[in-house]
Image: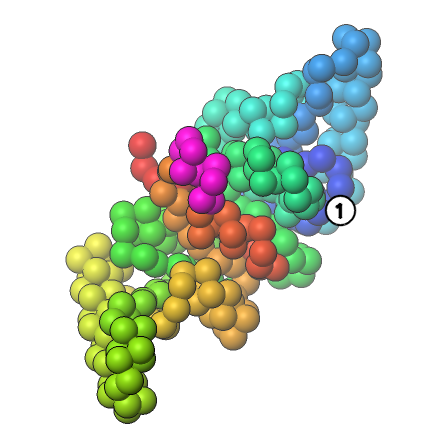
Amino acid sequence: MHILAATDFSTRSQRALRRAGLLARDSSAELTLMHVVDDDRPPDLVGLERREAERILGEQIGAIAELRGLRSRALVVTGDPFDGILRAAASTRADLVVMGAHRKQLLRDILVGTTIERVIRTGPFPVLMVNKEVDRPYRTALAAVDMSEPSVNAIRTGMALGLPGSARPAVVHAFLPLAKGKMFYAGLSRDTIDGYVADARERATKELVAFLEANGLDDHGRSVRVEEGAPFAVISKAVAQLKPDVLIMGTHGRSGIAKALLGSVTEEVLRSLAVDILAVPPLR
């Protein structure tokens, strides 16, 4: 296995390097630490920054405790950050890209997305965004499942990457009882509405269990939560209650105007929740 850890030398990125080191140690993976130098400047300045970046990466490999003794190397590329990361991931045949949480820049984020979102949108690589301080290996994981192929692929990828170790991720699924609003406005009793919602939850739970079984994920020790509500609200509540070390999600690979204007549940989670997040693109 090969892990690519991207850094801009910020505190956020250092957390990502430390997490990448722990993952590489647990899985005996090779590790590449990489930095992108902006090449839209005079060549002398680009060369100077490239040499400085190589020096800093070399120092970090020796100074960060989680990186010591690993099979690791430094890589500096030039270009736009998200494109440079994708090129580095392709050249190293990375199985996982690890990045720090993005710096929020509201207007730019709305118009073009953050670097990590663009890497997830346009690349074929699983991306781990590290939000939390690193103090131990992952022990617990939560997978958001919408009963689609991307969500199955995300669970399989997370398990193949060893997230978290040999444990099985818990599963959360959101459902919406479509007739609930109409029943409310029709003046039906609370007991009638509650009964309808309970029946809808039971149906959704049976469908989820059957879906997991059909995809070979029917581990009877796996915790399954089926909650009423919109996907982001349900995922956010489950993260707050379960406090997983890492959240696993699949992406649906939308593009164009739909992606730019509507966004996605994954992007909302990436921008809003303070948990480490593994975002897995669909199979191509």
Name the magenta segment's main secondary structure: helix
Q: Residue at x 66, y 18 (%)?
A: 78
Task: Identify the residue at image location x=48%, y=33%.
Answer: 94
Tell me which residue sits at (40%, 63%) in the image.
230
Residue 153 appears in the figure: no
Mark 1 — residue?
A: 11
Residue 222 belongs to magenta span = no
Q: Identify the residue shown where x is 44% and y is 47%.
A: 264
> Which quarter of the rendered picture does the C terminus lie within?
top left
Which residue is more in the foreground, 92 or 115?
A: 115
Considering depth in this image, is 182 or 12 the residue closer to the camera?
Answer: 182
Q: Is residue 160 above or below residue 236?
A: above
Image location (x, y in percent) of residue 271: 58, 51
* Horizontal relation, residue 184 to residue 57: left or right: left
Instruction: From the viewer's perspective, tell me whether residue 195 is left or right of residue 111.
Output: left
Q: Secondary structure at mark 1?
A: helix
Q: Is residue 233 left or right of residue 273?
A: left
Q: Residues within 10 Å of mark 1 (few under 14, many from 20)?
A: few
Residue 247 at x, y percent in the picture: 48, 58
Q: Amino acid at mark 1?
A: Thr
Query: Which residues are the magenta region?
Result: 255-263
Residue 246 coordinates in the image, percent (x, y)? 52, 58
- In reply to whether residue 256 is colored magenta, the answer given is yes
From the top left corner, tell me how far across and down residue 69 is, in percent. Answer: 66, 42
Count of numbered labels shown in the rendering: 1
Q: Which quadrant of the view contains residue 5? A: top right
> Is the residue 152 above or below the residue 92 in the image?
below
- Res. 187 visible in picture: yes
